[in-house]
Image (cartoon, rainbow, N blue to C red):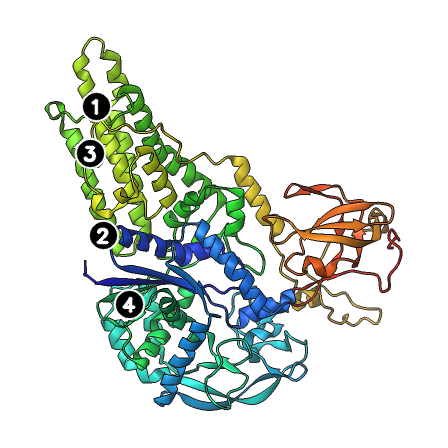
Amino acid sequence: MTDFKRYLVTAALPYANGPVHIGHLSGCYIPADIYVRYQRARKQDIQFICGSDEHGVPITIRAMKEGVTPQEIVDKYHAFMGKSFEEMGISFDIYSRTSNKIHHETAAGFFKKLYDEGLFEEKETEQYFDEKANTFLADRYIIGTCPVCGNENAYGDQCERCGSTLSPEQLINPRSALSDAVPVKRKTKHWYFPLQNYEPWLKEWILEGHKEWKNNVYGQCKSWLDSGLQSRAMTRDSNWGVKVPLPGAEGKVLYVWFDAPIGYISATKELTDKWADYWQQSDTKLVHFIGKDNIVFHCIIFPAMLKAHGNYVLPDNVPANEFLNLEGEKISTSRNWAVWVHEYLNDFPDQQDVLRYVLCSNAPETKDNDFTWKDFQDRNNSELVSIFGNFVNRTFVLMHKLCGGKVPNLHADVADKTDENMIAEFEATKTRVENLLEQYKFRDALFEVIDLSRKGNKYMQEKEPWIVAKSLADNPEKQKLIDNCLHICLQLTANLAVLINPFLPFTAKKMLHMMKVVEKMLDWENAGKAKLLSVGYSLREPQLLFRKIEDTEVQAQISKLEANRIKPASTQSEAVKNAKPDAKGSEAKEQPVTSNQKPEIVYDDFGKIDLKVGTILSAEKVAKADKLLKLEVDLGFEKRTIVSGIALHFKPEDIVGKQVVVVTNLAPRKMKGIESNGMILMAEDKAGKLHFVSPGTKIDEGSGVS
């Protein structure tokens, strides 16, 4: 194990444009937290750095969809994500943000140094421009039909339906996401970083110097380097981001992938005035935890930037994970096919460690893996409850029943080979776990900890202290056998607390409480020791570490996923394929097909719906529900409470007095404990923003709609 004086660990800066989901946790945040907690337990000098990436197109896209400013978006989601990470036990030393002044100054200064040293290429190129909005368009601001699958709402860089990587030139019928206008090409000037100049150094540094990197990381880097590197633009036309610090560069900002990784540096500056020790001393071990989609930026572009700037340490390792799928499908925020962390915590309060356990034991360390609610249930019930939790609970129950609630003595005169072998497993397991953690094999390391508790169960079963206790009246000396068994099981429990702490910190604290010991016992130097609990020490009554997950809970989560899924729009090609000839015998014109096309109905079906005009009297957010507003609506003949999922699109104060169309004969439904009596009709535009379906002029409440 190489010795370093200090450690600097970063976790990828998440875009502040939405909540955290399990794919984020599995990709880098849980692995990074496990590694950091382990190094802290080793008493290493370590800083754990992260923060919100608050620039770039995804932010402005989200702002456009919600009808608010980019600043409002990042303020909202920075706080939201920070809370989710904290509640999941992700123990950042700082969770900063790239909109902070210190970051703007650091990123601009970094760019200016490279510019002053003549390391950029200045180029004039043609890019898409929206004449109606009077602005250049980033690829994500251009929407059109995907040439691969026919999706009418593909972006200029990617189709989210089929996953194809695209360029704006490949889109059929491209249009601006800002104004719906057809974009045109205009000349613009930008500054390019010549990556090809650093290609020889990168090949030597990565391909020769870091063969120990994970195969997926090393392989992707090799593929890029073998294909040859090219100059890459480090600036963009936009008003949102870090301003390019040059005269005549108005309306231009730093490219988000130039700006974002510098966020690690600026966050460290914000955290400590000794930031340079962590970034500019060669005896610092820098580790980037990321997902596989960020490999090229952290392994090629950012290191080349650091090399060009000079005096910065380079990453010792970049342990990137693959992707986590959900119930056999790719996690998709646009389709709402995700398990959101804040919703999980609401549905499974105080069960953070169960999710941490499942996401670690099923981590996509070497290939894409799949999260299913059934597997979540099985791993909890069969491993956490039946193996780990069962061993700890049995140990405490028997200790209170057979040893007076105190740690019994270990009697050498009756100890046997089985006892010795069990004690030897303490140190052996510590060594295996330690070696695996140092190799970033967190899944295998966790297995070793659970396997130690499995061996504890087997040991206890072989010793059968509850059976031995039945013969105590005839042979009191057999109490020694009981004492030995439970002494070893209690010392094993203490070891399990130390070993499980990096993975399941909330569980480790529960175990400390039961053992009546201080947190210092979780220091890594205590792992493997056979005498952590003092003989004669009274311990508390056992508390269950984990509870069983019921079938009904799993089914509820699966039903929730399906109910909240946003269906992709039908394609133009499907519309043409299904078109019927018109009266002249020619094919009907292509018509846009709306999302979620419903089956054909007859007039009598429509006649069952009672639509009335109402006026919103009051609106307020529903507690612990980001999407819901509680509305009081005047229908003329009565006032009703309606819960509507429009909170991400409208501020409560902005819709009071608004006239709306209400489905009044819908069966009542409870949402977050509030009975909703009706449904507001809404329309969704191409950008995904909701609009009220309202009468053109104010009319009396209760007026019918037909």
Label at residue 422:
3
Please name the residue that numbered disc 1 is placed on.
483
Q: Secondary structure at mark 2?
A: helix
4 and 1 marks in contact (CB < 8 Å): no
- Residue at the extreme front: 273
Q: Which residue is mark 4?
A: 278
Q: Nearer the viewer, residue 270 or 606?
A: 270
Which is closer to the viewer, label 4 or label 1? 4
Q: Which mark is residue 161?
A: none
Judge whether residue 599 can be spotted in this image. no
The reply, left or right, for residue 313 in relation to residue 27 is left
Crowd rating for badge 3 (residues with CA inside 10 Å; few <14, some 14–19, many 20+): many
Q: CA distance from mark 3 to mark 4?
A: 42 Å
Q: Earlier in the sequence, mark 4 or mark 2?
A: 4
Task: Provide residue 305's location: percent of width, then percent of height.
Answer: 35, 78
Is 209 placed above or below 481 here?
A: below
With 423 as the anchor, is 506 left or right in this view? right
Name the residue: 50% across, 71% down. Answer: 55
Please, what is the three-letter code of the amino acid marked with disc 2? Asn
Mark 2 or 1, closer to the camera: 1
Disc 1 crowd rating (10 Å Cα; few below 14, some 14-19, many 20+) is many
Which quarter of the image is occupied by the C terminus?
bottom right
Q: Answer with the quarter of the image where residue 64 lies.
A: bottom right
The image shows residue 244 at horizontal and vertical percentages of 47, 83
Q: Amino acid at mark 3?
A: Met
Q: Which residue is nearer to you in this view: 525 or 386?
A: 525
First reached walking from the N terminus: tag 2 or tag 3: 3
Residue under pointer 2? 435
Q: Amino acid at mark 1?
A: Asp
Q: In terms of depth relative to the viewer, which is nearer, 650 or 445? A: 650
Near mark 2 (Cα within 10 A), the count class, few <14, some 14-19 or many ≥20, is some
